[in-house]
Image (cartoon, grey):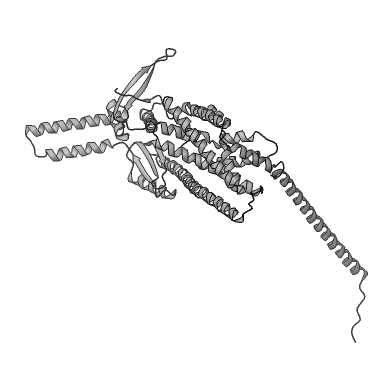
Amino acid sequence: MAEEELPKKPEETAGRHESEQQREAEKQAADKAQRGFRIALNNTWAFLQSILSLSEGLDKEATTEGIKMDVEFRGHAAWILVASIMIASIGLSVGNIPIIVGAMLISPLMGPILGIGLAAGTNDFELLKRSLTNFAIAIAISVVISTLYFLIVPTPEINAELLDRKTATLLSIAVAFFGGFAGIIAGSRSYKSNVVPGVAIATALMPPLCTVGFGIANAELDFIIGALYLFFINSIFIALPTYLYIHYMQFPVKEFIDPMRERKIKRRIAFFLVLIIIPGGIIFVNVIRQSFFSRNASQFLVAVEETLEDKNITIIDKQVSYDADHPKIKIALMGDPVSQDTRERWEDLRAEFGLEGCQLEIREPRDFTEAIEDLRQENLNNSAGQIEDFYRSEIEERDARIDELERRLNQYENSEGTFDDISAEVKMLFPEIQRAAYSNLVETSFNTAADTIPTLMVQWPEDMTEEQILASRDQLSRWLSARLKDDKARVIGYSLE
């Protein structure tokens, strides 16, 4: 006979009921928290959408018509471009940044570039042809006017503003891309803002074209190629965000009645995009490589300086030049000879910073002590066993030469240096210099007391360019200041004509 179930105690029944109520309350609280989190997340997403939405204020029809109107370079647009290129040329020739900025503000070059992006995004081949034609016209007008300016106006000294417009960097590409992105967003609004003038300044299309004119007028091929390189890479990365924006915002695509013609036009547009994107991608990769190389080279030079902290060696000049096939780092030194251990340490550092394919060129003054010892040893070997008067006089002459070298060495180590010492070192460190003169000039402005200025006058070869002379003079000035321990030391050029 089965056992009868014992009746449960009232206390057990009440406890189980309270436990079920507690679990139900916890479940309701968890459901409420989840609902609250979802509501908060949805509200946050809606808030972000309201802030970041590109649809508010968008006027596709007006944007399309406005870009098409700005594409043409005829009448007033051509004359505005002429005025802009003249102002930019004047600003570059004198190195005046506010004048250059003023030229970029009135430049109408953005029109055909935005037209290219719009045409590619809407399959409008006729607009693409018109934009490319006017883009070429704008380039031709700009280059011709700037070339005429630099042919008529006396050739200016190459300044930092001209030099900056012959090299594309990763930062300049980024500025062009985000500047173009800001430009098309601002231009597509039904209300206009002051963003577009800022885009014209940021993307800097006008100064590179002026630099091309300077290069043509002065037969400077590196300025022509470098400035055109910068101009076209900026143009590509302005048109690219325009094309992406037109696609993302789903601007109306041009429709064709004939399907075969539609396919033909789309193939042409695709071919054009490939033609633009592939060279642009290659240039972009090359610029990235150059940026990484410059960063690694800078870190390498800092590490090299650290290895010389406890040595009587000073770096008086350092240069980094990038070439895809033959990158190079040049270091000019003053002081004691560099030991083999130090050179081996530099080789390890070169590998550490990924510069194995980079040529390291070290220029240092000749070791006078070793030269004296070599000459003395040669003197002893050649004169051993010779007692004739002729050989005695030769020995005396060589001893005199040794004494003279020792005297010059003492002057080199313990004084500010004589002309002979300085000229010998100049010729050794800067072999391109043809003639040199040195003096301590006494100078006064008539309002202050006279001051003595150590001055080195040099003559450069006639075939050196202005840029090369400027770079050589800058290096020589830094070397002379370090050599004489005098910041007032200066270098000037002179001619015998």
Instruction: Mark yes or no: residue 69 visible.
Output: yes
**Residue reaching furthest to the bottom:** 1
The number of numbered badges drawn on the structure is 0
**Residue reaching furthest to the front:** 258
In the image, residue 415 sits, relative to residue 372, either above or below, namely above
- Residue 487 position, x and y percent, is 41, 26
Side (left or right) of 265 relative to 371 = right
**Residue reaching furthest to the top:** 446
**Residue reaching furthest to the left:** 388
5 or 109, which lies in front?
109
> On the rendered image, what quadrant is the N terminus found in?
bottom right
- Residue 115 position, x and y percent, is 59, 42
85 or 37, which lies in front?
85
Q: Residue visible at 36% across and 17% down? A: 442
384 or 109, which lies in front?
109
Side (left or right) of 227 relative to 431 = right
- Residue 412 position, x and y percent, is 30, 30
Q: Residue visible at 51% across and 37% down? A: 137
Corner quadrant of residue 215? top left
In the image, residue 146 sits, relative to residue 9, either above or below, namely above
Corner quadrant of residue 408? top left
- Residue 370 position, x and y percent, is 25, 38
> On the rendered image, what quadrant is the C terminus found in?
top left
Instruction: Mark yes or no: residue 156 visible.
Output: no
